[in-house]
Image (cartoon, grey):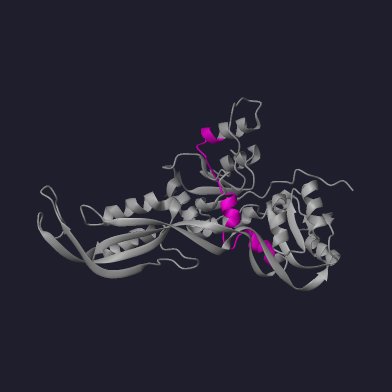
Amino acid sequence: MNLWGVIVNRVMKLKELISLVSLKIAPLSLAENWDKVGLQIGDVEQKITKALVCLDLTPHVLKEAVLKKVNVIFSHHPFFFHPLEHLNKNDPQYEVLKLALQKNISLVSLHTNLDKTFESLSDENAKKLGLHNVKPLVVDCEQYSKFVVFVPHTHVDQVRQALFSSGGGVIGDYEQCSFNTEGTGTFKGRENSKPYLGKKEKFEEVKEIRVEVRIPRSLEKEVLSRVLKVHPYEEMAYDIYPLRNFSENTGIGRVGDLKKKISFLNFVAQVKKQWKLKSIRVVKAKPFVQRVALCPGSGSSLWKEALLSKADVYITGDLKYHEVLDGSLHGLGFIEIDHFTFEKDYVSYLAKKLKHVSKIQVYEYNQAKNPFHTIH
């Protein structure tokens, strides 16, 4: 059985790849404040030809990366999550770091930013259960800015292309979105000025286009840098406005409805079948289920959000006793899918996304095993 999915080869710098991933797959700005996403080890100027995707970065993953001559590893769970206070041969992280540095393998994490994206693994899980009217359990506020620049007619196309190529103008499933207004710009150059149009020390009126594009706030500096390179003016006039755009499609977890009510026990049987579980922990609060909330991984803390969504049952991992007790007393049922089982599909999910946007060679590490065993 082939455990490795391979795609067409292409070379790109690590900083280009990370920028592309943030733009097309999982914006780094979506991550929770406590999370540690993005580049964790590596040189942004490194040339990347091969990537490996894993759930957790372990010595076994590093050895496979070396065997496959991989340049970068994308893990879902961050390798560095807590501050590293010391490092010696007895620390679990030692072997991984040593080998990564020796073999020049970069490490990148996509965690809560990947969880929140539109058409995320949570959406895939909702489809597995046959849910309709699906929306995020916790809607997130996307961090965007409005970039406005004033351009003479001769350079509008170049400036717009710079905006689009650096990550601007993406709204949902649409790219290269902009608004353009024609107007008149005025200026008077001082003694040492070198105006692109007109003459210094003379009042000028110029027909210009006001170009407006929405950009991810995390890419403001990158967008500005690229526009400055193609804009003809000695002093470019531009504005950056912070936005608070709420999206119905991005956020942690999902909630949706079954086509019709089914008994709690029949729904549990459906969940067991979909995730191939031999046993499952549940808390029955209602005899029937129609509205379902879910959150892959460790989502016990979101039980109140599940309750407020009017869900009949909440599916997640790492459930805690007191939270489950409180939730059940308020009429919320629980189904626990262990952390590994509920998130292992992130490997194939992310590898497919990387294949689509980057064209580099990608491998999936599917040899990881659940550390927990159930003894019947």
Residue at the extreme bottom of the image, as rendered: 260
Residue pictured at 59% horizontal, 51% vertical? 112
Q: Nearer the viewer, residue 323 or 70?
A: 323
Quadrant housing residue 335: bottom right
Check the image and report above or below for 180 versus 240.
Answer: below
Res. 287 visible in picture: yes
Quadrant of the frame with the N terminus: bottom right
Question: Percent x, y for residue 73?
Answer: 55, 45
Quick check: can you spot residue 198? Answer: no
Residue located 73% across and 64% down the image: 310
Tell me: residue 250, above or below residue 42.
below
Horizontally, residue 225 falls left or right of residue 244, namely left
4 with respect to 197 (left or right):
right
Residue range of the region highlighted in magenta in the rendering: 100-127
Q: Quadrant of residue 98?
A: top right
Residue 9, image x, y percentages: 48, 54
Q: Is residue 103 above or below residue 14?
A: above
Q: Magenta stretch: residue 336 in it?
A: no
Residue 132 position within the rendered picture, expressed as x and y whole percent measured from the top left = 68, 71
Give residue 99's quadrant in the image.
Answer: top right
